[in-house]
Image (tube, rainbow, N blue to C red):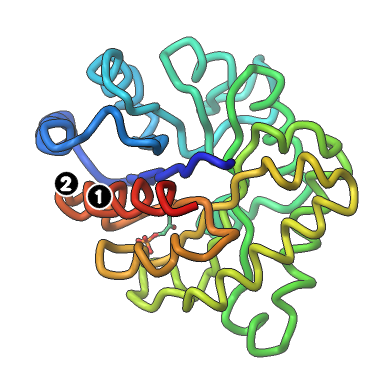
């Protein structure tokens, strides 16, 4: 059985005081016995502080990006081992905002995935099509290309642990989430593609949905058989919303 994961991507939001307030409010309500993994992804400069705050909590900490190189003369970059050193357990690679604004291509994302895995971090690989690509009927071709680049460089074995996040670009920050059926169709496609290499690993791989997840739609999205949780942006910054989304994931687990 796949344990659900709810991951909060804070993007470039927060401050020392705001993070402390958000976590305090969220933690107050959290049920540590819930059968769900929870992780938050603060901006780099807050990682060490958030990791310290959450040391005894049932909440993991992850980074939003990582350098593909293990270390050296790369001004402004952060190595995977450094993330591990300050208490990170996970790292997002290939978020569509980085693919777009930082011009990250599939090859670079595959190298970042490798760097994260080598350092013992769990990569959260983001894939997803733009609206134009969906309307042109290219959704499967796009996510297959994004996934295949990582599989070609890393093999299928890391997916026993690694997480995939299907985030259709048109659903991110728009308030317009994919329907549960749309999400399920792509998640099932991704799982079949991994199964072509290893059916056992495909059954273990966690595939999250991301894009305008909120308390009001989390239940129906997580009810889909191949949706193993969510990668949540805006709603992860609101303690009540994030709590309700985690509760929806916990309820799903009990039904499986
Ligand atoms: P929103 O939940 O704000 O749409 O963001 C989704 C996302 O990009 C998470 O990585």
Q: Which mark is residue 239?
A: 2
Q: Secondary structure at mark 2?
A: helix
For the N terminus, the image quarter is top right
Image-quadrant location for residue 38: top left
Image-quadrant location for residue 42: top left
Considering every residue shown, the one lying at the far bottom of the view is 135
**Location of ligand 1 given as a quarter of the image:** bottom left
Identify the residue at horizontal 79%, vertical 41% (top origin). Answer: 200
Identify the residue at horizontal 64%, vertical 63% (top origin). Answer: 187
Considering every residue shown, the one lying at the far top of the view is 85
Mark 1 Cα shell of 10 Å, populated few (<14), some (14-19), many (≥20): many
Mark 2 Cα shell of 10 Å, populated few (<14), some (14-19), many (≥20): some
**Above-or-below relation of 37 to 75:** below
**Between 80 and 213, the one nearer to me in the picture:** 213
| Residue carrying label 1 | 242
Gap in angstroms between the C-alphas marked 1 and 2: 5 Å
Looking at the image, do the residues carrying marks 1 and 2 touch, with CB atoms under 8 Å apart? yes
Q: Secondary structure at mark 1?
A: helix
Q: Within 8 Å of ligand 1, the CB of disc 1? A: no
Looking at the image, residue 172 sits to the left or right of residue 91; the answer is left
Identify the residue at horizontal 63%, vertical 18% (top origin). Answer: 120
**Above-or-below relation of 106 to 76:** below
Provide residue 235's location: percent of width, then percent of height: 26, 56
Provide residue 43's location: percent of width, then percent of height: 36, 35
Q: How many marks?
A: 2
Looking at the image, residue 214 sits to the left or right of residue 1; the answer is left
Looking at the image, residue 7 sits to the left or right of residue 200; the answer is left
Provide residue 16's location: percent of width, then percent of height: 17, 29
Identify the residue at horizontal 68%, vertical 40% (top origin). Answer: 204
Provide residue 155's location: percent of width, then percent of height: 86, 37
**Between 147 and 215, the one nearer to me in the picture:** 215
């Amino acid at each position: 059985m796949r344990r659900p994961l709810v991951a909060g991507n804070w993007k470039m939001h927060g401050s020392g005081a705001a993070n402390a307030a958000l976590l305090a409010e969220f933690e107050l309500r959290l049920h540590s016995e819930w059968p769900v993994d929870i992780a938050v992804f603060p901006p780099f400069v807050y990682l060490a502080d958030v990791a310290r705050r959450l040391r005894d909590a049932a909440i993991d900490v992850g980074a939003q990006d990582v350098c593909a190189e293990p270390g050296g003369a790369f001004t402004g970059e952060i190595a995977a081992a450094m993330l591990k050193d300050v208490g990170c357990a996970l790292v997002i690679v290939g978020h569509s905002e980085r693919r777009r604004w930082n011009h990250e291509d599939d090859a670079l994302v595959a190298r970042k995935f490798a760097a994260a895995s080598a350092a013992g971090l769990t990569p959260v690989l983001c894939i997803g099509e733009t609206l134009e690509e969906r309307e042109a009927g290219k959704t499967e071709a796009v996510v297959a290309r994004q996934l295949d680049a990582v599989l070609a460089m890393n093999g299928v074995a890391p997916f026993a642990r690694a997480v995939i996040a299907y985030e259709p670009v048109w659903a991110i920050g728009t308030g317009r989430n994919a329907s549960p059926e749309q999400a399920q169709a792509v998640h099932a496609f991704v799982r079949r593609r991994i199964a072509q290499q290893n059916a056992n690993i495909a059954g273990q791989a966690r595939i999250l949905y991301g894009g305008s997840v909120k308390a009001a739609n989390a239940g129906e999205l997580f009810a889909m058989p191949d949706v193993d949780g969510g990668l949540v942006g805006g709603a992860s910054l609101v303690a009540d919303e994030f709590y309700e989304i985690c509760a929806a994931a916990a309820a799903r687990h009990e039904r499986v």
